[in-house]
Amino acid sequence: MFWLKRNLPRLVIAPSFGVLAWFVYGFILWTIYISFTKSKLLPQYKFWGIDQYFRLWSMDRWHVAVENLFIFTILFLILCIFIGIVLAILLDQKIRAEGFLRTIYLYPMALSFIVTGTAWKWILNPTLGIEKFARDIGFETFTFDWLTTPGMSIYTIVIAGVWQSSGFIMAIFLAGLRSVDDEIIKAAKIDGANLVSIYTKIILPMMRPVFMSAIVILVHLAIKSYDLVIALTAGGPGISSDMPAVFMTQMAFHRSEIGLASASAIMMFLTVSAIVVPYLYSELKREDERK
Amino acid sequence: MKKIIIAILAMSLVPSLSYAGPKAEVLHWWTSGGEAKALKVLKDDFAAKGGEWLDMPVAGGGGDAAMQTLKARIVANDAPAAAQIKGPTIQAYDREGVVAPYNIDAVAKAEGWDKLLSKQVASHMKCDDGKAYCAAPVNIHRIDWFWANKKVLDSNGIKMPTSWAEFNAAADKLQAKGIIPLAHGSQPWQDATVFEAVALGIGGNDFYRKAFVDADVATLSGSTMKKVFDQMRKLKSYTDEGSPGRDWNVATAMVMEGKAAFQLMGDWAKGEFAAAGLKPDVDYYCASTPSDNGYLYNVDSFIFYKVKGSDKVEGQKLLASLMMGKNFQKVFNIYKGSIPARLDVSMDDFDKCAKKSNSDLNTAAKKGGLLPSFAHGMTLELGVKGAIQDVVTEHFNSNMSSDDAVKKLASAVKAAI
């Protein structure tokens, strides 16, 4: 009885831990192994070496996808955080109808990326959306055809992604701002600091953990971005707005290149780990220090 | 009490012991109006023969989730009875060892499919080095079609083109009048569809065979291929700026409304015209794209995997036999816009375009122009096909020169083989 009492929490956790270990970490290991095989249509288990990685990095399309990933991630990160902070600071000024405005900014988050992508596809389509509207009301030379211009289409994905996610980032920062002690702000005011320097020199530096969570959330959203690309551009025009996640799905399920797809999945996995692992490490270390 | 328990146990055992009747789980992409109606014919036939049909429809053209499920189930040794798989992918599955022991081969031999199908179609349906049937064909789609708005063409004094030069002249004339010459949706598969028709027309039948059946690198990077890319660049200038990403049926609607003059698309486009109540030669023209008696075909088919249990094997046999049935082949193809794969189905009830398709097919077969469509996965491994498609769509949607395009084509194909 005593044994049961002491071990009950472990027993309760054990099944979900086992499931998690198998379906997450087990399959990660499986994917790593498959990326070293010649698997085409179905998985094969004969070891082949790292040729799939050579093939992957010799493909133009993969280079396009990786380049797009960097463009998208960097712009998405900077714009979301910038807009999120500005909105959060503005909302933090104890304004009227704050709850209502907050809901409006947060609302895009309630939509799936598929809906966002489809809506923006119509808005940005030169023969249906903004360009046509501007031309119809008299600006006949107005041109906004990024969606159908190779090399620019990736920026339309940034626009739609930022529209969707910046409200959420605002909410994170707003929560962070609310947790800042009023006394600090009052003290700074007594010392004669103006509002701008209170925010830039005192409050924002205090919100380091909030920045970290925002960055990790945004980066993993960016690397995994699949549905938004599919709904908005489907990787087009041509292959100009391809992204690694789209590339991987294409290879695995349309092209019968499971080995190559696994290699690209592992590349994505390494990219995510490169960002998330140091973050987790530093966070956990800090918690240890607090103890 | 004891007796009751025994009785209950006995009863619960009965269903698993008795023979349950043929059973088939079918994975397919036919969810749109006409296709669903046509498939119902098959389902009803199947039910009438005492079979139990488990439907696995996949909505939408992409079918990522379905392919994922299909592969997972095959790996788990629990494949569905039949799945809509075509072209060399059938033989690729066979090489993975998930198709043998070819349950439907006995049916095919008993019904004499070798006589009911043309040699070329039959070859796509056979596994085990062409020894055993492992798939059943349902239709033959032609890819290299031009669809055109009759009113627009007639009022501008334009006839259906018989050479690409003629098409270019007609397109220039139309463009000068403010009509979009070519309704096109620039999605990778649509770009590839246009590309293969152009390659067939400009390069000829042997060129097409060398490039897209044999994947001969010298042909893919040769001077004829450059001319094909040159023509693609011209065609790009005949499309409108809303073209990238447009769905094919939206492009077909542009032709119907007279906004655009031509569309190059397989004969499923006819279904759109028919659904709008339009008739060939009255409202629209159908003609093959310019080529030397070429004919690019796509044969939709169902592969029959290895399954366990006699009820499932019986289900596969019944399904295969019904799919090749005269009734289904006729009704289905009238709805679908294609022509029957089975040779002895009367073409009387089909429209003019389908009759043309049928007679062109026979001519092409005699003159060596009957060729598998690469854009629709009837030739080349999917990886090689995808590599070609990437270059084609990248070229079409950028300022890439034809020289660079052929170089890229050669290196992409080499990497994919």
Image (spheres, rainbow, N blue to C red):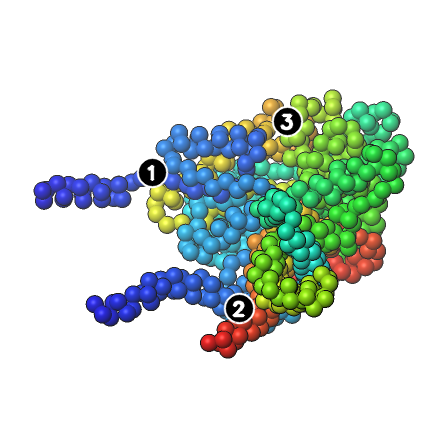
**Residue linked to disc 3:** B275
Chain at numbered mark 2: A
Q: Residue A191 placed where, x, y %? A: 70, 68
Horizontal side of residue A241 vs B176, given as left or right = left
Closer to the observer: label 3 or label 1? 3
Q: Position of residue B218 (x, y in %)?
A: 76, 60
Q: Position of residue B72 (x, y in %)?
A: 47, 54
Q: Which corner quadrant of the image does residue B300 belong to? A: top right
Report which residue position mark 1 lands on. Answer: B21
**SS class of the residue under badge 3?**
helix
Q: Which residue is identified by label 2?
A: A32
**Quarter of the picture holding the N terminus of chain A:** bottom left
The reply to whether the C-beta atoms of the residues labelled 3 and 1 are less than 8 Å apart is: no
Q: CA distance from mark 3 to mark 1?
A: 38 Å
| Image x and y of residue A17, in percent | 39, 64
Q: Residues within 10 Å of mark 3 (few under 14, many from 20)?
A: few
> Which of the two discs, 3 and 2, sits closer to the camera?
2
